[in-house]
Structure formats: structure tokens, C-alpha cells
Image (cartoon, rainbow, N blue to C red):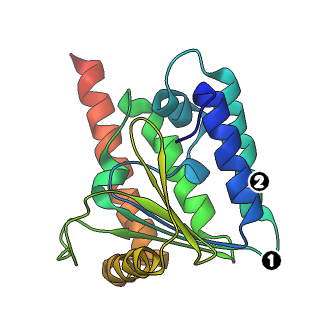
């Protein structure tokens, strides 16, 4: 568990990310921190957390550094779950499309039509194949046992195999963006 409130937690996560050369992130419930817009991050972290939001957004610079590799697998539910107004989601989806085009980033989404390899009970991040971190409501669980890492790697690969990538991913994100814009229009018409 990490102390120091939201800013301390974000600083610890940023240090962990900076020290890794390779990360695999599975997220069944939300957009992972490295992929969040500042508006999404503000709602995900909570009110009065400007320092934590800034630290989260600043940490995203690692996505542009050479010599690093990132693999992200999200469920469609993670992409459709919004922490606030639907109006923040088109920009968030644009961010996903942008990141998916980076040469050292592999981003996939498991569409709801795909058969799940397992129940996605929780998300996790594997760092360099040696540590897996599970984020909870109150802190992080850091797993280092070989069998724990292997189980998370196996789960990641199973979900990755069911995900869509490239043009298929961008088509899915465009469909979801259309759904959000329709919802925004409906809410404005009320």
C-alpha cells in the first residue's frame, strides 16, 4: 500500500513506470492511467487532486521514449465506463486512437461480442515480467512470486488473444465515440 494520498500514490506509480522497460496492462473497468486524458484522470483520481492529476499526465511521457515497450488490453466495458459526463469521452477515445499508432505500443480492446477467456475480476500491470501490481480502492498489491507473475502473464495473453487491434480497434473506438455523441445529443435534448 502506498501512502501520501493521491499525489503520493501517483508519484510512486510514476517512479515504478519510469523504472520499467516493458509493461503489460490489463484493465477491465477503466482507462489505464498512462492512457487517460487530464479530464478523465481528474474524475478518476477525485476532487482537489491537481498535483496527482499533473503527476499522472506527466508520467505519460514514457510512452514516447525509445527503448520501452507497452502492451495494453482493455475490455470494451472499460472503454464504455465513464467517470463523469459523456462529453469527456470523445477526447478520451481520440487519445486511445493516438496512442494505438505509436510504434512501441500495442493497444487492444476485447469487444463485448468476444468470448472472454476468463472472468476479468481485476486489472493488473506487469512490470518487466518480475512484478505485477493490482490496484485496489485503498492501495496497490505488489505481487512478486513466480507463480503469481505467471498467472497474470497467462491471463494477459488470453485476453490479448481475444482483443482487436489496428484498424479493427479504431473502427470499434469510432463506433463507441458515435454512441457517446448520440448520448450527448440525447442529454442536451432533455
Where does the C terminus fall, quadrant-wise? top left
Residue placed at 35% from the left, 39% from the top?
181
- Image spot of residue 31 (x, y percent): 45, 50
Secondary structure state at the residue bearing disc 2: helix
Work out which residue is located at the far right of the displayed protein and give it.
Answer: 66
Q: Nearer the viewer, residue 23 or 71?
A: 23
- Image spot of residue 50 (x, y percent): 66, 22
Q: Which residue is mark 1?
A: 67
Q: Is residue 123 above or below residue 44?
A: below
Residue placed at 63% from the left, 70% from the top?
101
Q: Is residue 116 left or right of residue 160?
A: left
Secondary structure state at the residue bearing disc 1: loop
- Image spot of residue 189 (x, y percent): 24, 20
Specify which label sits upstream in the sequence, 1 or 2: 2
Q: Is residue 30 above or below residue 111?
A: above
Q: Real-space Cα distance between discs 1 and 2?
A: 13 Å
Q: Is residue 24 above or below residue 154?
A: above
- Image spot of residue 78 (x, y percent): 34, 52
Q: Is residue 138 left or right of residue 77?
A: right
Q: Nearer the viewer, residue 178 or 163?
A: 163
Residue placed at 56% from the left, 45% from the top?
36
Q: Which mark is residue 61?
A: 2
Residue placed at 73% from the left, 73% from the top?
21
Q: Is residue 167 left or right of residue 29?
A: right
Amino acid at each position: 500500500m502506498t501512502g501520501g494520498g493521491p499525489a503520493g500514490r501517483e508519484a510512486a506509480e510514476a517512479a515504478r513506470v519510469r523504472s520499467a522497460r516493458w509493461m503489460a496492462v490489463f484493465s477491465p473497468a477503466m482507462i489505464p492511467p498512462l492512457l487517460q486524458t487530464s479530464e478523465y484522470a481528474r474524475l478518476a483520481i477525485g476532487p482537489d487532486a491537481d498535483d496527482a492529476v499533473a503527476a499522472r499526465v506527466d508520467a505519460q511521457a514514457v510512452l514516447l521514449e525509445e527503448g520501452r515497450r507497452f502492451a495494453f488490453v482493455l475490455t470494451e466495458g472499460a472503454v464504455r465506463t465513464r467517470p463523469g459526463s459523456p462529453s469527456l469521452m470523445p477526447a478520451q477515445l481520440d487519445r486511445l486512437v493516438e496512442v494505438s499508432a505509436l510504434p512501441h505500443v500495442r493497444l487492444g480492446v476485447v469487444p463485448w461480442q468476444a468470448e472472454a477467456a476468463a472472468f476479468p475480476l481485476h486489472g493488473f500491470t506487469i512490470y518487466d515480467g518480475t512484478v505485477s501490481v493490482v490496484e485496489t480502492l485503498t492501495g496497490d498489491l505488489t505481487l512478486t512470486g513466480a507463480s503469481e507473475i505467471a498467472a497474470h502473464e497467462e491471463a494477459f495473453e488470453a485476453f490479448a488473444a481475444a482483443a482487436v487491434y489496428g484498424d479493427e480497434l479504431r473502427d470499434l473506438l469510432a463506433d463507441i465515440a458515435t454512441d457517446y455523441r448520440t448520448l450527448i445529443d440525447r442529454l442536451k435534448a432533455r
